[in-house]
Amino acid sequence: MTVLRNISKTSLLKLIPVTFAAFIWVTPASAGDAAAGKVIYDGKGACAICHGATGAGDGVASAAFNPKLASFVIPAFRLDTDGDGNSGTDTDLSNAIINGAAKYGGNAGMPGRADFSDTEVNDLIAYIRSLQK
Ligand code: HEC
């Protein structure tokens, strides 16, 4: 009886990491809230100053940049921050937002916002994606 009880306890313990892993796996990487992202984009992120109110890359400070800012409306993302051969993945956008573009060979005009939480970054990504026409 004691042996049986021990076995079932061990199996239960083994299930804990499996259950946890499954939970992480079904949680989408970027489950951001676009509406919350807009508040940050227009507000404390000051993204609109450069990227424009509609994400067209035509904000009031955009004229200072050459080459022209990439548009979020017709996405043609430049930065491949993780070197996987694809630009504009959630990882690329997230890295650019947190660390700025210069770290990845891009324009130093793109400031890093390491002060933003993962939630804020995911919300911004959701908002940027929602700007695509
Ligand atoms: C002072 C101007 C400025 C501000 C403010 C700014 N950006 Fe940028 N951003 C840039 C520039 C310039 C680039 C282009 C970098 C490059 O392509 O070399 C860029 C690039 C990006 C990219 C990568 C695009 C690509 O082509 O891969 C993302 C994503 C981005 N910005 C998001 C944001 C977000 C979100 C905010 C607000 C938190 C923000 N930016 C604030 C100037 C700015």
Image (cartoon, rainbow, N blue to C red):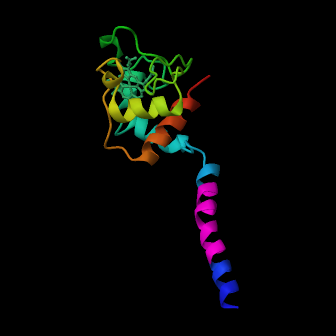
Tell which quarter ligand 1 is in.
Answer: top left
Which quadrant of the figure contains the C terminus?
top right
Position above or below: 61 against 45: above
At x 64%, y 55%, the residue is 22
Left or right of residue 54: residue 6? right
Whether 15 is among the magenta residues is yes
Q: Position of residue 20 (x, y in %)?
A: 59, 60
Q: Report which quarter residue 98 is drawn in.
A: top left
Q: Residue at position x 59%, y 24% from top?
A: 132
Question: Relative to 133, does residue 90 appear above or below in the rendering?
Answer: below
Magenta stretch, main secondary structure class: helix
Instruction: Name the quadrant containing residue 116.
Output: top left
Residue 7, how many percent across, how many down? 66, 79
In this picture, which residue range is highlighted in magenta? 10-23
| Front-lying residue, 50 or 16 | 16
Q: Position of residue 85 (x, y in %)?
A: 52, 20
